[in-house]
Amino acid sequence: MVLTKLQPKKIYRLCSVCGMSSGDDWCPRCGTGLVGDVKTLIIKDGNLRGGFSQIPNVILRNPEIGTTEKCVYCLLLSYAWQDAECFPGQDTLAEHLGCTRKTISRALAALRDHKLVSWKRRGLGKVNVYYIEKLDNGYVPRQTNDRGHSF
C-alpha cells in the first residue's frame, strides 16, 4: 500500500480591483493583496499598475556611470522583466527616454565598457539582442559606505 500526501486545494479568488482570478495572495495583474477577502494593498494609480523598474544600488550610486547610462540600463531592465521576449531597437529606446538615437548608442557603448551589457547583431534591418550581464562578470563598482564615501 502506497500512501501519498494530499496537497491542500488551492483557493482562487477574484481581484476586486481588476477582476483577475488568482490562486496567490496577490493579484499578478494589478498588485492588489488578496488575503482572504481583505485587500492589503491597493494601487490607485493605473500607471503604476503597468509595472515599475528597479536599478541595483551599486549602479545607481556609482558616479563613474553617467545619468543617461543609468537610465538606459534601467530601461533595458524594464524590457527584460516582460513575460514575452522583447527586442527594443535603439529608436524605441530613444523615443522612450526622449533623446536621440546617437545618445542611446553612446550610452550603450559606455555600459558595454563597464561590462554591464552586451549585444549581438542579428542582421541588417533587424534590432540587436541585448544581454544584461551578471554584475560579477567583470563589473567592479567602487565601494561606498552609507554616506557615499569611497573606501
Image (spheres, grey):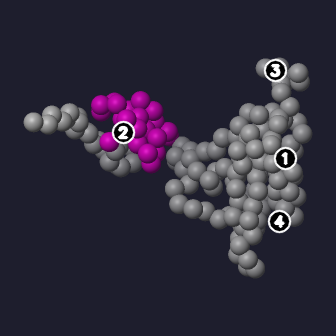
Which comes sooner in the sequence, label 1 or label 2? 2
Which comes sooner in the sequence, label 3 or label 4? 4
Magenta stretch bounds: 23-44
**For mark 4, what is the residue?**
101
Residue type at tag 2: Asp
In the rendered structure, does residue 24 fall within the stretch colored magenta? yes
Q: Total of numbered circles in the picture?
A: 4
Q: Is residue 107 visible?
A: no
Q: Which mark is residue 128?
A: none
Which comes sooner in the sequence, label 1 or label 4? 4
How far apart are the alpha carbons under marks 3 and 1?
A: 21 Å
Q: Is residue 102 visible?
A: yes
Q: Position of residue 38 (x, y in %)?
A: 34, 30
**For mark 1, what is the residue?**
114
Height in image: 7 above or below 83?
A: above
Q: Nearer the viewer, residue 88 or 32?
A: 88
Between circles 3 and 1, the one closer to the viewer is: 1
Q: Position of residue 95 (x, y in %)?
A: 74, 63
Residue type at tag 1: His
Callout 2: SS: loop
Q: Residue furthest bottom?
A: 124
**For mark 3, what is the residue?**
145
Q: Residues within 10 Å of mark 1 (few under 14, many from 20)?
A: some
The quadrant in which the N terminus is found is top left
How far apart are the alpha carbons under marks 4 and 2?
A: 41 Å
Between circles 1 and 4, the one closer to the viewer is: 1
Residue type at tag 4: Arg
How far apart are the alpha carbons under marks 1 and 2?
A: 39 Å
Between circles 1 and 2, the one closer to the viewer is: 1
Q: Position of residue 141 (x, y in %)?
A: 83, 35
Residue lying at 44% horizontally and 45% vertically, measured from the top left: 28
